[in-house]
Structures are given as C-alpha cells and as structure tokens.
Image (cartoon, helix red, strand yellow):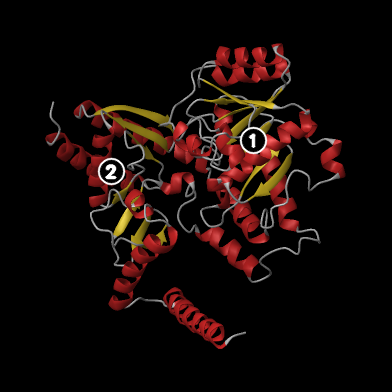
Amino acid sequence: MGIHKEKEMMDYKDSVLKESSQVLDYILKDELTEADKDRISKDSIDNFNNHVNPGWLKYRKSVSTDANFVEWTDSQETFSDTHGNEFIDCLGGFGVYTAGHRNPEVVAAVQAQLNRYALHSQELIDPLRGYLAKLVAMCTPGDLQYAFFCNGGAEAVEMALKLARLASGKHYFISMVNGFHGKSMGAVSATGKGTYRKPYLPLIQGVQHVEFGDAKAAETAIKNLIAVGETVAGLIVEPIQGEAGIILPPDGYLKELREICDRYEVALIFDEIQTGMGRTGTMWACEDYDVVPDIMTFGKAFGGGVMPITGIIARPHLWTDELKDNPWILGSPTFGGNPLACAAAIAAINFTVKEDLPAQIKEKGEYLMDKLEQLKEKYSILVDIRGKGFLIGLEYQTPEIGWAVSKGLFKRGIMTGGTLNNAKVNRIEPPGILAYETIDVIIQRLDETLAEVSQGVNP
C-alpha cells in the first residue's frame, strides 16, 4: 500500500471514529445540552441534503415553518423535537402506532428478549417465530393458518404474489386503480398509481388494473384473460384504499370479489398492512365485511410501534408440497421473523386483545367522526369526511387548501398526513390509545385552523 493511500485510510478511520463517537454520545446521554440540540438540527439538515436525498426535506418538512424541527423523543400520543416542542400525533406513522408510541408492554418484551439474544442463528429453531405464527393464525378469521414473516410492507406483498403463483401455477394478477401495495418491483407492478409506476416502466408483466368498487370489472378482466389463453393467479385489493384517500368499498363489493375468485379459482389477496391490527375498529378490516381472503398481508401496527415486522398468512391449500419440500423457495429474508421483532409482535397482539383496542378505536373513531362532521357543516372548504375507526380522510376543495390546513395544524402542534405529494385528502391515523381529552384538543385546534384557512380562501 502506497504512503498516500495509507494516509487516506488513517484519515478515514480517525474521522469515522470521531463522528460515530459523537453520535453515540448523543444517543447515550440522558439530556442534551443546548449546543447539542443546535448541532443535531444543523447536522440533520446537512446529512439529509448531502447523504440521503436533497428532496427529502422539501417533501417531509413541507408543513413546517422551521426546518430545524428534528424528531427526538416520543411518548404514547405525542412526539417531541430536540428543543422540546411537542406534537400530538394524528399521522401515526401511517398506521404504525396503533398501540401508541413506545408502548411500555411492547418495549419491555423487546428489552427482555434483547437481554437474552437478539437475532437468530438461521439454523436452529427460533421459538418466538413459531409462537407468533400460531398467534396470528388464532387471531385471524377463517382457516388462515400458515404465516411467513418479513421486514417491510412491500416485501410482504411480494411474498403474497409469489405464493399465489407458486401454489396455482398461474400467472396474471388483477389489481385496483389507485391501490397501493408498495414500491419494490413486484409490489409497484400491482400498485395502481401512475406516480409510482411510471419511473420504472416496463414493470413486471401480467398485472391488469380495474376500478376499485366495480366487481363486474374484475370478473370481466378475469374472464377475458382466460378466454385468450392466459391464467390468473390472484386478485389483490386493500379492503379500504389508504393511499388513494381513504376510499371505502361499496356494500357487498368484497363479498362479490370472494365469490368471483372462488368461481374462477383465483387466490383472493387482502392487503391489510395499513388496515390490520385494529386500525379500522375490528382486528382486521375484512372481519367487518365478513370475508376471508386466501392470503392476507399485515404490517405497520403489527410490530407494536417498536420493531419493524410484516408478513403474510395463508389458507392451508396454498402451502403446497413444493413449499414443504423446499421451505426457502418462497423467500429467506435474513432478518425476517427475528426474535426481537417477534417479541414486539407477540406483545402487540397481547396488548391489542387484552385492552380490546379494536373496540376502543371503533368507539373513539365514531366520537371523532361526529365532531368532524360538525366542522364540515361549519366550513365549506372541508368537502368530505370518510373512514372507519382511526383511519379517516378529510377531503378539501383543493390540494392547496389541504396543505394549508396541514401547515396550520402543524403550527398548533398537530401532525397530520397532508404533504405536497397529495394534500387534497389529509389522513388522520392517530394512536389507538388516544384519550378522549386529546381528541377534543385536536378538534379545537382543527376548528381554529379551518377558520384561519377559510378567511384566506377566495369564494
């Protein structure tokens, strides 16, 4: 090694050691100094602009009047920045925090498992994965039985699509316009939003999109594919479309899809990554519509708001001999179903069932919806309110108005789901443990914001 290269390596080691030691000091400190807070804010902006994506801050901080807001701590209903500014969470990580931020019972389970061992050897049987799979089978409807765990929502969708093809030997998928299933290549192929699809065209072939809510369109697509010699492996649908703006299915629609899939021997896949674990007022949204899918994906709230874990559960007939002979053929994510994540999910299921969180969310959601309807009557800029439980969409006259409302709420210490990407519909997805008193505070501040924004709108 030349002297110059050796010197560069020494500089690299020294600089990395200095930087990582400084960050670890921040992490391990009980209290930050004012200088620490200022430095973290400055560093965060520099790091995102220079090492993450220069567009991230514009997108993520679009409702903030100060780019120095840096998330640092949280507590059940709220999160705070480095300077102690507290925000009531009405976004909930798009459904992650159903059991609340840092739920003590989930944290305790993860800490206990961390003190035992963190990740699995990949060779011996890891018991928590088995216990968790059994619990998922116990708390899901119908004869859903076999589970497979992974890390992110898109990965779970990939597993669902692969399983449908593997089990059936068929090829095509039917998906819904404006549906959202993730951004990996297979998942974004099933996603029905051009914004996410166009940069990657041509995508995985064999996906046809039909209108959500139109069961006849789904059946026609299946019939036409079969008529020209194609085969259809699965139909994938969100029981309630989230990214599309909280779009509820028409009465009887999901049951019709079940009947159609049975008729043509097509696997019905429900994407419950956002709607599952009590978010809509039942443990799984499909329960409210009395429909059992062949494959169901889950995630977000599944890890109790503490650990990332997602997965699928499927009916027994889809677990074919090919899968039994080669258990790794479906997938083998290194960290999928790891002990820490499984401990979190087990604690999350326990907490959700013990506290009857779905019933709580149903009642609180109805209370919140009633208050929101009163605001809709009061302010013409709010044109529609729709949703179930704590999955609620507020639709405004224009994206600009929705963005202004999100910005006004942020100014008043409320974080919602309005962004520059699509602010016409703001998503309200607070933690399921939200207190009624906090709901009243949210309504009061939304009332103030709507009054302020309405004054600036030209009729």
Q: Which mark is residue 73?
A: none
Q: Is residue 11 visible?
A: yes
Left or right of residue 252, residue 342 in this image: right
Q: Quadrant of residue 454?
A: top left
Quadrant into which the N terminus falls:
bottom right
Left or right of residue 216, residue 421 in this image: left
Q: Which mark is residue 296?
A: 1
**Label 1, residues with CA under 10 Å away: few <14, some 14-19, many ≥20:** many
Circle 1: residue type: Met
Q: Is residue 431 visible?
A: no
Task: Identify the residue at horizontal 78%, vertical 32% (top origin).
Answer: 167
Q: Secondary structure at mark 2?
A: helix
Q: Secondary structure at mark 1?
A: strand
Nearer to the camera, 30 or 70 = 70
The vertical placement of 229 against 311, above or below, is above
Can you give x and y, in whole percent of width and height, for residue 6 in the image? 56, 85
The vertical placement of 265 against 406, above or below, is above
Circle 2: residue type: Ser
**Marks 1 and 2, how far apart at CA:** 33 Å
**Label 2, residues with CA under 10 Å away: few <14, some 14-19, many ≥20:** many
Nearer to the camera, 212 or 432 = 212
Can you give x and y, in whole percent of width and height, for residue 388 in the image? 44, 31
Residue with the mark numbered 2: 406
Quadrant into which the C terminus falls:
top left
Can you give x and y, in whole percent of width and height, for residue 109 in the image? 60, 62
Task: Identify the residue at horizontal 20%, vertical 29% (top origin).
Answer: 379
Looking at the rendered structure, the number of numbered marks drawn on it comes to: 2
Left or right of residue 365, residue 226 in this image: right
Name the N-terminal-most of marks 1 and 2: 1
